[in-house]
Image: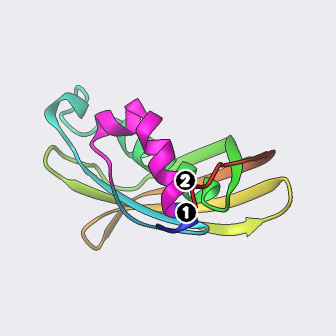
Amino acid sequence: MSKANDIVSQMMANDSFSQWLGVDVLEVREGYAQIKMTVREEMLNGHRVAHGGISFSLADSAFAFASNSHGQKAVSIETSINHIKPIFEGDELIATAEKESISKSLGQYIVRVTRGDELVGLFKGVVFRKQDNWLISD
C-alpha cells in the first residue's frame, strides 16, 4: 500500500461523515484524490435537488484526502464552491482533487465534481500544513 493510500485509509476509518455520504475512494496518490458517491433521497432539499452541502461535502472530503496525502497533516483554512448544475437523487458524483500549489505551510487545491462527463461543481480550497506528520505503516 502506498503512503497516500495508507493515510487516506487512516482518515476514512475515523471519518463518520464521509462514511455517511457513502464515499468510495477510487484513486489516491500524492497531491491527488478521486472519490465517488451516489445521491440519496435524504440528501435532497425542498426543491427536490441535492442540498448544496452534499456536493460541497464530497469535494471537501476529496480535498482533505489529497492535501493530507503528502504525509504532513493539513487542515482547511478557506474553501468555496460554485454550484454549476443541479444534482438529483440517484446521480453518481465523482470528486477529483488536485494540488495546484504547495509550500512549507500552505497548499492550494482545485476539486472538480462531475456527473459523468458533466461538471456540476467547482471547489477551491486552501490548507494550512501543520508540523505533524501522519504515522505510516511499513
Q: CA distance from mark 1 to mark 2?
A: 5 Å
Q: Where does the C terminus fall, quadrant-wise?
A: bottom right
Asked whether the viewer can see residue 107, the reply is yes
Residue 128, horizontal then vertical, whole percent:
77, 46
Q: In the picture provided, is 54 more to the left or to the right than 22?
A: right
Residue found at the very far front of the displayed protein: 138
On screen, 101 above or below 38?
below
Q: In the picture provided, is 114 more to the left or to the right than 88?
A: right
The magenta stretch spans which residues? 5-24
Task: Give the residue at x 39% y 32%.
Answer: 17
Residue type (three-letter) at the residue carrying disc 2: Ile
Magenta highlight: main SS: helix
Q: Nearer the viewer, residue 137 or 16?
A: 137
- Graded by Cα atoms within 10 Å as few (under 14), some (14 to 19) or many (20 or more), the crowding at tag 1 reads many
Task: Give the residue at x 14% y 33%.
Answer: 41
Residue 54, horizontal then vertical, whole percent:
36, 39
Q: Is residue 58 magenta?
A: no
Q: In the picture provided, is 59 more to the left or to the right than 86?
A: right
Number of marks in the rendered image: 2
On screen, 113 above or below 45?
below
On screen, 23 above or below 47?
below
Residue type (three-letter) at the residue carrying disc 1: Ala
- The circle on residue 7 is 2
Q: Are marks 1 and 2 in contact (CB under 8 Å)?
A: yes
Task: Give the residue at x 67% y 62%.
Answer: 70
Q: Is residue 17 magenta?
A: yes
Q: What secondary structure is marked by label 2?
A: helix
Residue found at the very far bottom of the displayed protein: 117
- The circle on residue 91 is none
Residue 26, horizontal then vertical, whole percent:
34, 64
Q: Which residue is mark 1?
A: 4
